[in-house]
Amino acid sequence: MFSSVFSEERVLWDFGVVIKKSEKTVGSSQNFVKKEQSNTTINAVLSDPFIPPVKSTHPSLLPHHIAFQQQKINFKLNPEMKLNQVFLLTGKKYLQKNYQSVIVILEQVDLTQLPDNERHDLEYWLADALYQTGEYSKAQEVATSTLEKNKIDRLCLLLAMIYESQGNHKKAKKQYLKLVTQYPKSDFFSSARIKFRILGQP
């Protein structure tokens, strides 16, 4: 406990308490402080520095609500823009978590004209962007269609999360199990196994 002595008074800043110096002494081992009203005013209220601030959560950002609220974007691609430029632009927006822009851009692109690797990335970004903005039905459609052509672990995980967000725990559990059994070396293996166990609890 830290204290500071001013004249005849001891100010305990920790609690905002002022203790007057004893005016009477009784016996050799006990001191009693005379009760009196203190005229000292403490103008500063000090809070405990070890208590972390409480973060308020907006109702719309709770589970099963849209994770990102963004304004409607009207964006037209330059018809002369090359597909590799579109790919780079979309990747930049995705990394910036500007999911609405990702959706708007890819709605204007014929993905079949792209090489397989780039097309698979764009399809995943689109499915995830739809998921992140709460478009679960559209996200499911894109993820399911893409997974049929490109069986990769991240799409499997994304589809499981989409099902879970829709409240379809049975399908989500099945998808998590598929990831665990078919992709044992996946970076998502541990997370999928934990989710599978959680959803399996009564």
Image: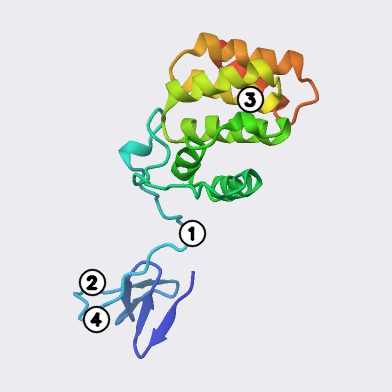
Q: Amino acid at mark 1?
A: Phe
Mark closest to the chain's N terminus, 1 or 2: 2
Give the x, y percent position of residue 44.
Answer: 31, 75
Which tag is nearer the camera, tag 3 or tag 1?
A: 3
Residue 57: x %, y % from top left: 36, 43
Label 3: state its secondary structure. Answer: helix
Q: How many marks?
A: 4
Tell me: residue 54, above or below residue 180. below
**Label drawn at residue 155:** 3
**Circle 2 sits on which residue?**
35
SS at badge 2: loop
Tell me how far mark 3 sits from mark 1, CA to CA. Answer: 42 Å
Q: Is residue 202 visible?
A: no
Residue 98: percent from left, percent from top: 48, 47
In the rendered structure, the answer to whether residue 54 lies left or right of residue 175 reads left
Q: How is the image coloured?
A: rainbow
Question: Reading the chain from its start, which is encountered first: label 4 or label 2?
Answer: 2
- Mark 1 highlights which residue? 50
Q: Residue at x 64, y 19 (%)?
A: 147
Residue flagged by tag 4: what amino acid is it?
Thr
- Please rate how many residues cluster around mark 3, counting C-alpha atoms within 10 Å: few if below 14, some from 14 to 19, many from 20: many
Q: Position of residue 5 (x, y in %)?
A: 41, 85
Q: Which residue is mark 4?
A: 40
When asked about the image quadrant of residue 70, the answer is top left
Q: Is residue 72 above or below residue 192?
A: below
Nearer the observer, 98 or 52 = 98
How far, Cα to Cα, is label 1 from label 4? 27 Å
- Amino acid tagged 3: Leu
- The secondary element bearing badge 4 is classed as loop
Distance between the alpha carbons at the discs numbered 4 and 3: 67 Å
What amino acid is at disc 2? Lys
